[in-house]
């Protein structure tokens, strides 16, 4: 099957790289990025056992003459740690990886974050290519150059900015993704639409059933629009000093929900879903949004049926949120909406506003469960 | 006591930073770098218990209004590991360090390498200042932006390029350094002279007794010339793609000696001393150097009385050297001399040449012991 391939160029201070999006692209990764693969003595693949059991044949066929060495990281946020990075770096060294080697991160968000960080620090930096296999990774985490791992004290507290040489998002790989993971990733695309692309938001609003069916054209369009939005923002603010902050919409409370639940109860995208519900509520309470617009946005989010929001006390979430690394400088920055596609960063959100909005989100979640 | 302070500006692709060198400078670090310290909410010091027991009063007095939090790393190459970095990052997080915090690395080469790497990856990068307390760190490792830790598989196999905001080299702090450590550090200055600064080499040649007595003017001059040489090379080749390779003079075999001895038998500078003896021998065998020049250079090195070279087999050192990260790309690069102050990088040094030169160095070491 031939398919249309869209390539978006991400421009950064240190150069640019292509993000290619299309159906069943994995098999042509070497041909597509021939300049990156040519003259590589050593190619390494970091992946998860689950992804590898499903898609190794296709990727190995593409990489065949390169005889890649395959490294594994088990699935789950709990393996996104420095201890695992050390193990993987030792495996690279043992397998003879040098500064001219190439690492392919073939998996979801954790594989991309750990693989990118491994590439950032192994011999003070080697090239890598992202091949994201979840919707979350395709629409969000594989673009932007943020890499890193967790500490017990919090998510992504250590890491580097290290851009990949290329990203290849094969939407066909999403066919083996669970509906829950697909929908969790879709929340990041909803976020992309809400903060900066009203057309993307409307497209998702109208196409939820087609997304659940994994219709290739629909998935491609969503990945493309999400990547385009993010690449523009990253280009304008590579080191997150200003505009890039808007990508954090729904994440301040989302991260707190994840931390409070011990990174297990909800997937990242699901926690962000509830975080967006909270941010939308605050935006409405401030009359940044009309009730109708807030309700429309919330409707699209809850239509994806995120698991119930655990009954954390608002106070506990607030405490955790104020530890969030983006809020440490003193003031608590919050991303709110002034309309679909129009984000605004504010610094004066009070504890009372957040508490009220969290309580409202918890009440909404309970009401949905009771039905 | 007032002293003359020399400041050398290191220029890098990402900006520039000052290296200030002088006697008894530590007490004025905040005043000297007021632009870096002003408006800092949180300042952290990474140091070793030994350095802190000797010099804490002076540094704390300088930092007093900032109420720095002090983190400790035990002395020794074996603590230069990712596990320690994780512990220190967790301590930073627990103490409320945020992206606007400043870390001061106050200690020898290991403190500088680990502190720089911690600053490179904590929250994807925070500012840091180097305050090197050993001659080795002052003349070499605190300048250049290379940071990192060891793997079991080899030294500095993971790390980052992350430049400090400033370096302050207080030669008075060298007064508490053991003679062995002082001399080990001096080998890096001899290297600086041999590869690119004949006047520095002659100065060391003439002033070894004054160095042992820690004469401030002599130490300052050596640190200054060494830093100037290194900053020029780093400016011209920040990412070690060409010229910077010459800094590796004596290091290919030096690293192998360290690795073979388990990083305990010889200090880094002492291993480099023997590595330089080997490289000088190869240079002479190739008629790049006259016998007289080789002997003169060797005389200055062995006058510092490095501990005997353990009787590794030449084959073992060669095997380890070919695993060295700078030699993985296939060819074995070697830095040789064509005269005092004139380094040359060659790629065609044969195993036989290295074997002969290692055997000669071992024989010389044995002959010195037998005397």
Image (cartoon, coloured by chain):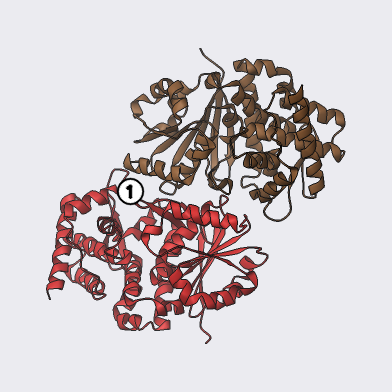
Chain colours: A brown, B red
Image quadrant where residue B76 sits: bottom left
Dividing the picture into quarters, in which one does residue A258 lie?
Answer: top right
The disc numbered 1 marks a residue on which chain? B
Query: Which residue is the extreme one toward the top?
Result: A1
Image position of A215 (left or right of A336): left
Hey, which residue is sitting farthest bottom in the picture? B1
* Residue occupying image coordinates x 18% and y 57%: B312
Vertical side of A124 occupied by B261: above or below = below
Q: Secondary structure at mark 1?
A: loop
Name the quadrant containing residue A109.
top right
What is the x, y in percent for residue B19?
50, 69
At x 22%, y 54%, the residue is B317
Image: B294 above or below A70: below
Is disc 1 surrounded by few (<14), some (14 to 19) or many (20+) residues within 10 Å?
Answer: some
Residue B358 position in % (x across, y down): 18, 59
The C terminus of chain B sits in image quarter: bottom left
Residue B103 placement (x, y as % from top left): 55, 62
Residue located 65% across and 64% down the image: B40
Residue highlighted by disc 1: B153
Res A229 seen here = no
Q: Position of residue B42 (x, y in %)?
A: 63, 63
Q: Is residue A34 left or right of residue A300?
A: left
């Amino acid at each position: 099957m031939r398919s249309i391939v869209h390539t978006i160029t991400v421009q950064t201070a240190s150069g640019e790289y292509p993000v290619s999006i299309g159906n069943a692209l994995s098999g042509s990764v070497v041909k597509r990025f021939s300049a990156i693969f040519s003259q590589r003595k050593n190619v390494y693949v970091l992946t998860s056992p689950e992804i590898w059991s499903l898609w190794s044949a296709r990727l190995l066929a593409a990489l065949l003459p390169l005889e890649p060495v395959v490294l594994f990281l088990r699935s789950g946020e709990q393996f996104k740690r420095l201890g695992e990075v050390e193990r993987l770096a030792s495996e690279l060294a043992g397998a003879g990886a040098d500064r001219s080697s190439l690492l392919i991160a073939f998996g979801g968000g954790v594989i991309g974050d750990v693989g990118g960080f491994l590439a950032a620090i192994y011999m003070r930096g080697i090239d890598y290519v992202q091949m994201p296999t979840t919707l979350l990774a395709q629409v969000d985490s594989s673009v932007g150059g943020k890499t890193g791992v967790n500490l017990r004290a919090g998510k992504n507290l250590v890491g580097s900015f290290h851009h990949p040489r290329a990203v290849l998002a094969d939407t066909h790989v999403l066919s083996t993704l669970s509906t829950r993971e697909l929908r969790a990733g879709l929340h990041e695309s909803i976020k992309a639409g809400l903060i900066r692309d009203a057309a993307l938001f409307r497209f998702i609003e109208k196409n939820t059933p087609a997304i659940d069916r994994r219709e290739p054209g629909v998935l491609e369009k969503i990945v493309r629009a999400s990547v385009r939005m993010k690449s523009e923002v990253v280009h304008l603010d590579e080191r997150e000093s200003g505009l890039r902050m808007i990508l954090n919409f729904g994440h301040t409370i989302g991260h707190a929900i994840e931390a409070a639940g011990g990174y297990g109860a909800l997937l990242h995208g699901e926690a962000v879903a509830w975080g967006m519900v909270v941010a939308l509520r605050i935006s409405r309470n401030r009359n940044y949004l009309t009730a109708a617009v807030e309700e429309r946005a919330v409707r699209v989010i809850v239509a994806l049926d995120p698991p119930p929001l655990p009954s954390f006390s608002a106070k506990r979430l607030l405490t955790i949120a104020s530890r969030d690394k983006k809020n440490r400088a003193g003031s608590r920055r919050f991303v709110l909406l002034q309309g679909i596609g129009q984000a605004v960063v504010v610094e004066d959100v009070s504890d009372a506003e957040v508490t009220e909005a969290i309580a409202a989100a918890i009440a909404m979640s309970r009401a949905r469960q009771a039905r």
